[in-house]
């Protein structure tokens, strides 16, 4: 079976389209509004509709002005987001807006379709949740907002934040916003009766679960006002996912009746993606691309380093690193087991590494595992243990590189080098997730001499410097 990269699949996905893409998808009529180290861009309809371009330009300029003057999230959202939501936001510690929230919220709250493109841990989730709460009506029994996530772990996280912010307030007459998670597994059967009897206001779902409910007509999107696709670039790893996403965007709902929001830290060929969203009618023509820190894809406080050794020396090298670094909380990323290794009857690399760490003096009280083959309850238990505090070592595959929010993590170790720069970006983004913190966060790659060229390629693509270290 042929294997394709995410970028190839993205390009391949459009070959099924009835409309060919023009040779130059970025006509001079495209509008870009630039700010310091960030870009807000819109792609209006081509030159045949100049009045639309001037209207969009005026709106975006006004939105930038609002963002520059606001010093708190309340100032950005007041008059749009219900007061009890804003009070809850402040109670849980979100007061000052991050860069992406400052730039995106005026755009989102004005009703524009939007592509949120910013570093991992920059606050995209809170931005789109606040925008969502500004339009849903809790008095109405219908699904009004859908958040599509790539993994169950990210879905659990988004659901938890949404429920915390929308908890029933003390004042009478104000209803809590009901949030349902459709994240695969046995729970789906339990949710069918709930969906029919009393539809929730917000649904957080993996793409497979959402399409399953839509196909069986257990769930409809007739009343949906907001559709959010988180980690949108991850979907292009699979042709089946692309096909399902197209159905959600075009068959089960219409761009006329909804606000569409795409979010990710990595969108390959983002200008083409912006253009194609309009051409394929995934978004309205005045969609706004909020691109924060385009020159610096990763937080500047991350320190990158590498250590060269032979492949069979990596386990002992990792133990030496853990002893010298003494991290309070760390994630060790391991590659998927190869088919050759499976056929040879060898154990999964994650299991072998877990056994080594648990029998060695690592200094961490808990050594935990997170990988695709684990059942849902085991994966949830691992995340729950880590969020309760204390020191931990998490051994994980790339399942943990997307959206898992563990703010205490200070060290990332690439026991196996990721396959591409995008995977490196998301792995590294599991640390440095406290927006206003000055904590030093370190990303370490243990590589063979032959892998040095691949790491240099990641440095060039992601614009960072990786220093060599010697134990």
Image (spheres, helix red, strand yellow):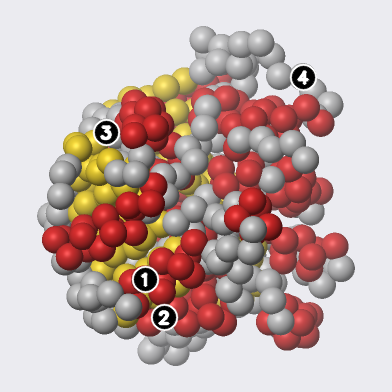
Is 202 positioned to the left or the right of 125 in the image?
Answer: right
Q: Secondary structure at mark 2?
A: helix
Q: Earlier in the sequence, mark 4 or mark 2?
A: 4
Q: Are marks 1 and 4 in contact (CB under 8 Å)?
A: no
C-alpha separation, residue under disc 3 versus residue under disc 4: 37 Å
Q: Residue at x 49, y 86 (%)?
A: 173
Density class for disc 2 (Cα within 10 Å; few <14, some 14-19, many ≥20) is: few
Residue 85's quadrant in the figure?
bottom left
Mark in the foreground, 4 or 2: 2
Residue 384: image tag: 2
Work out whether residue 324 or residue 304 is closer to the camera in this orientation and state it.
324
Identify the residue position indicated by label 4 in the image: 20
C-alpha separation, residue under disc 1 versus residue under disc 3: 32 Å
Q: Earlier in the sequence, mark 3 or mark 4?
A: 4
Q: Are marks 4 and 2 in contact (CB under 8 Å)?
A: no
Residue 337's quadrant in the figure?
bottom right
Q: Secondary structure at mark 3?
A: loop
Q: Residue at x 66, y 35 (%)?
A: 4
Q: Residue furthest right?
A: 216
Q: Earlier in the sequence, mark 1 or mark 4?
A: 4
Identify the residue position indicated by label 1 in the image: 356
Q: Are marks 3 and 4 in contact (CB under 8 Å)?
A: no
Identify the residue position indicated by label 3 in the image: 464
Residue 429's x, y, as percent? Answer: 35, 51
Q: Residue at x 69, y 14 (%)?
A: 22
Q: Is residue 381 visible?
A: yes
Density class for disc 4 (Cα within 10 Å; few <14, some 14-19, many ≥20) is: few
Q: Is residue 100 visible?
A: no
Q: Are marks 1 and 3 in contact (CB under 8 Å)?
A: no
Residue 361's x, y, as percent? Answer: 23, 75
Work out whether residue 446 or residue 420 is closer to the camera in this orientation and state it.
446
């Amino acid at each position: 079976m042929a294997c394709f990269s995410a970028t190839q699949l993205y390009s391949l996905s459009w070959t099924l389209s009835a409309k060919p893409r023009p040779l130059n998808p970025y006509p001079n009529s495209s509008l870009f509004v630039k700010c310091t180290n960030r870009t807000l861009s819109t792609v209006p309809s081509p030159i045949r509709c100049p009045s639309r371009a001037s209207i969009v330009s005026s709106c975006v300029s006004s939105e930038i002005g609002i963002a520059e003057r606001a010093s708190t999230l309340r100032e950005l959202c007041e008059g749009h987001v219900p007061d009890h939501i804003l009070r809850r936001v402040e109670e849980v510690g979100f007061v000052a807006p991050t860069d992406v929230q400052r730039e995106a919220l005026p755009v989102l709250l004005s009703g524009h379709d939007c592509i949120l493109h910013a570093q991992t841990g920059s606050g995209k989730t809170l931005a789109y949740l606040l925008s969502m709460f500004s339009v849903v009506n809790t008095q109405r029994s219908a699904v009004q907002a859908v958040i599509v996530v790539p993994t169950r772990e990210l879905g659990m996280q988004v659901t938890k934040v949404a429920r915390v912010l929308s908890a029933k307030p003390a004042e009478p007459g104000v209803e809590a916003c009901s949030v349902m998670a459709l994240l695969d597994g046995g729970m789906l059967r339990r949710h069918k009766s709930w969906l029919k009897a009393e539809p929730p206001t917000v649904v957080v779902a993996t793409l497979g679960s959402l399409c399953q409910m839509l196909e069986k007509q257990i769930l409809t999107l007739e009343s949906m006002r907001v559709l959010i696709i988180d980690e949108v670039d991850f979907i292009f790893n699979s042709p089946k996912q692309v096909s399902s996403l197209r159905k959600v965007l075009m068959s089960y709902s219409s761009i006329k009746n909804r606000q569409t929001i795409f979010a990710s830290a990595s969108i390959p060929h983002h200008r083409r993606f912006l253009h194609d969203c309009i051409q394929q009618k995934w978004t309205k023509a005045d969609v706004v691309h909020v691109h924060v820190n385009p020159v610096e894809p990763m937080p500047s406080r991350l320190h990158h380093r590498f250590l060269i050794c032979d492949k069979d020396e990596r386990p002992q090298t990792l133990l030496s690193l853990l002893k010298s670094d003494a991290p309070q909380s760390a994630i060790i990323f391991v590659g998927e087991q190869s088919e050759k290794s499976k056929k040879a009857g060898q154990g999964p690399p994650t299991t072998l590494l877990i056994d080594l760490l648990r029998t060695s003096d690592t200094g961490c009280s808990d050594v935990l595992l997170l990988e695709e083959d684990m059942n849902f309850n085991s994966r949830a238990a691992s995340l729950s243990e880590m969020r309760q505090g204390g020191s931990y070592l998490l051994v994980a595959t790339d399942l943990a590189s997307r959206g898992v929010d563990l703010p205490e993590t200070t060290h990332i170790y690439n026991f196996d080098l990721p396959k591409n720069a995008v995977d490196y970006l998301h792995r590294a983004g599991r640390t440095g997730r406290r927006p206003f913190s000055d904590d030093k966060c370190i990303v370490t790659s243990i590589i063979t001499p032959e892998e040095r060229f691949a790491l240099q390629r990641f440095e060039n693509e992601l614009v960072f410097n990786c220093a060599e270290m010697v134990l």
